[in-house]
Image: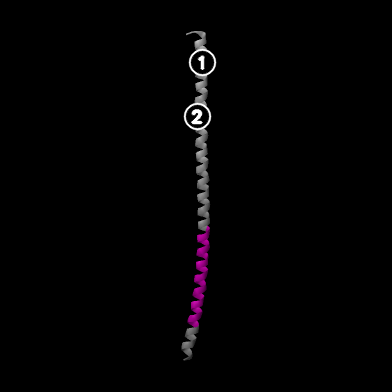
Amino acid sequence: MSHEGREKVAITTNVLQTVVLLIAIGAVMLQMGRKDQQLELTAKAVETLRDITTDLAKTQINLTVNTDHLSARVAELHTRLHELETRQ
């Protein structure tokens, strides 16, 4: 093989190596982008779950307060009814 032929092969090899390297770098960047997108979606899902949990906790507190209030009201009515029954 002549000197010119070897030089062309070397240049072609270098170009192909560069192309393969650029493709590999692009693939890595694409994979990183996908992982970043997945992390973002997971963060949004966690935020939504946090909001739901907060709403559920508030609802539970309100139900407990309402139950306590209703229990006190029922006890008060029971006392009044008992008073009425003893008067008669």
Q: Is residue 19 magenta?
A: no
Q: Nearer the viewer, residue 36 or 78?
A: 36
Which amino acid, mark 1? Ala
What secondary structure is the magenta-colored segment mainly?
helix
Report the amino acid beneath label 2. Ala
Marks 2/1: CA–CA distance: 21 Å
Q: Position of residue 58 (x, y in %)?
A: 53, 62
Q: Residue at x 49, y 82 (%)?
A: 79
Earlier sequence position, callout 2 versus callout 1: 1
Residue plotted at (51% across, 8% down): 3
Q: Which residues are magenta?
A: 54-79
The numbered mark at residue 24 is 2
- Of the pair 79 and 69, the residue shown nearer to us: 69
In the drawing, what numbered circle is on residue 2? none
Residue extending furthest toward the bottom:
88
Q: Which residue is mark 1?
A: 10
Disc 2 to disc 1: CB gap under 8 Å: no
Residue 59 position within the rendered picture, expressed as x and y whole percent measured from the top left? 51, 64
- Determine the secondary structure under disc 2: helix
